[in-house]
Image (tube, rainbow, N blue to C red):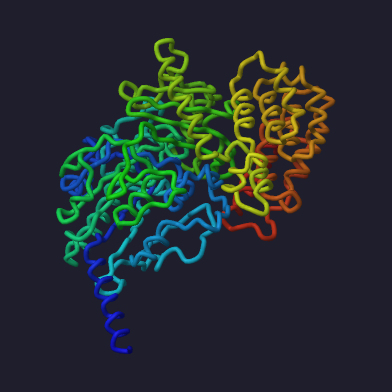
Amino acid sequence: MLYKAVCCFFGLLFSSAALAAERPNILWITSEDNGPELGCYGDTYADTPNIDRLASKGVRYRVCWSNAPVCAPARTTIITGMYATSVGGQHMRSMVSLPARVKLYPQYLRQAGYYCTNNSKEDYNVEKPGQVWDASNRRAHWKNRAAGQPFFAIFNIILSHESKIRKRPHQLVHDPKKVRIPAYHPDTPEVRHDWAQYYDVVTEMDAVVGQRLKELEKAGLENDTIVFYYGDHGSGMPRSKRWPYNSGLHVGLVVYIPEKFRDMAPADYVPNGESGRLVSFVDLAPTVLSLAGIKPPSFYQGHAFLGPFATEPQPYIYGFRGRMDERYDLVRSVRDRRYIYIRNYMPHKIYGQYINYMFQTPTTQVWNDLFLAGKLSPPKTFFWQRKPPEELYDLTNDRDEVNNLATSPAHQQVLDRLRQALDAQIMRIRDVGFLPEAELHHRAEGTNPYDMAHDDARYPLARILKAAKLASSMRPDVTQQLAHDLKDSDSAIRYWGAMGLLMRGREAVDSARQSLLDALKDPSANVRIAAAEALGRFGHNDDLDQSLTVLLDRANMQKQGVYSAIAALNAIGTLGPKAIPLRDKIAELPRKAEGLPRRLSSYVPRLLDELVGRLNP
């Protein structure tokens, strides 16, 4: 009996080793804050010989989107295989729980025998369900695996990050006179320097890519390893990073598949070739599982584009924007091969809201200064102005996305098709972004945002989406309906009723004044905040004191929570000189709260500093 057991044990070991030998190693080399500004993508100003060399052996994907134009929600989408807007992780450096049945993709790989390492950034907006990586730190490396064990390894390169673009002093290598300035940026020495420095740091990043590839080659693993290179979202320049335009979402994606695993490649895989398939970050988890021979779980929302479980190409890819650091917004986008459609659900907010981190970049500062001085003309003014509800751009003829075709009679069929595709996507994934952030966490108490969103009693999405679309349509003939929505049984619809009146300004607020005054006592804090902002900005003088009282109360992070405080402080910031009576009390508001995650700790202090500085004489 013992002899049989030993034979069986060694037989299992042998079969596992044989299976491991047949499976590819998978290496992801990622870089921060850079789009397809690479030589292999036809950028003649770029100097990226190592990525170009990888592309000459593999295939580059013409269109890959990061889904989110900033790191944390983009990485949340990758690690979960689901859109961050579906699990509630779309807001920058938030934290939500997942259903107990959900595993992150490295957990499936480890279960199948892979050694999984991450070197080293995680930055997920979801709580990890147990051990995810065999190693996740700056020392994590595939070389530490057991003999014969297949590996999945990530090396993340930070050299191209936004913070490196503005680091001074810096001796430029790329000639700033030769850089291409996008149509939306002013042509100034500061802007040229930042763009040239961006290309410099991309070259530095490329050198590290080369080191990682050489390391693989020296270990004799080049022919056993499928290699991916991609950036984590668009460039760190303003109106790329943080914005779900093509400029903020489009990244380079290069994949090399060795000859021995060529059966895992799609039909359009040709060395030194280009794939026209639309792919995005939500597709990465199912793709890596497919390459490892693992059938992707049914809850994944992406589509594998390599391996035995590859699916048919999809007609559209999707982007989103939620809270960016300390500023709220709500934007969704969708593109096909040629057009991008953008839906702004908060068009009353300007594109370039003040975000402390973004304003440290010289381009942002000089761009804003020139606008305030009246020295810019369209399209360079757009970033500092209110948004239209809808945007449509022809990427074939308008790479900078500045000629909005949403009102073009010749493009109404395209507009309607993409509009319908976006609405269908929102309903399909049960996008939770139409709840204010505090309300999202409130409704998910006792469960998690994903499961909450799939319970129509808790989250009647069709009704809420209809209210959000009406509110943000900016149609002048729906004021009565918006006031009616303020009396709805669902607090999210009441919120959108108040927001719709706020967006339309003085006349709409005046027509629904009593309903908004009643809303100052609404059971929902978010409804109260929206109503207080509307009355504070556009109501009668007699309404200001009540509005300020509501907003100051909700701005206390220790009493009301961080999400309520961020929303209230943002609202106070829109009041201008009307908020001066709160100046001293704002300065005394708490800057810390017990139990507040470190990831969220800087946002309220930033808002308080900015407000106090602006309200001081």
Q: Position of residue 47 (x, y in %)?
A: 22, 43
Decide which of 479, 328 is in the foreground and name it: 479
In this view, the residue farthest toward the front is 1
Q: How many numbered badges does the structure rendering display?
A: 0
Q: Is residue 81 visible?
A: yes
Decide which of 579, 325 is in the foreground and name it: 325
The answer to whether residue 523 is left or right of residue 179 is: right
Is 223 rendered above or below residue 9?
Answer: above
Q: Residue at x 26, y 32 (%)?
A: 178
Q: Picture quarter containing residue 531? A: top right
Q: Is residue 613 visible?
A: no
Q: Position of residue 496 (x, y in %)?
A: 67, 30
Q: Residue at x 21, y 51 (%)?
A: 257
The answer to whether residue 315 is left or right of residue 463 is: left
Decide which of 586, 15 is in the foreground and name it: 15
Q: Picture quarter containing residue 108? A: bottom left
The answer to whether residue 545 is left or right of residue 279 is: right
In this view, the residue farthest toward the right is 542
In this view, the residue farthest toward the top is 409
Is 145 rendered above or below residue 506?
Answer: below
Name the quarter where the N terminus is drawn: bottom left
Name the quarter where the C terminus is drawn: top right
Q: Picture quarter containing residue 69? A: top left
In this view, the residue farthest toward the bottom is 2
Q: Position of residue 200 (x, y in %)?
A: 29, 45
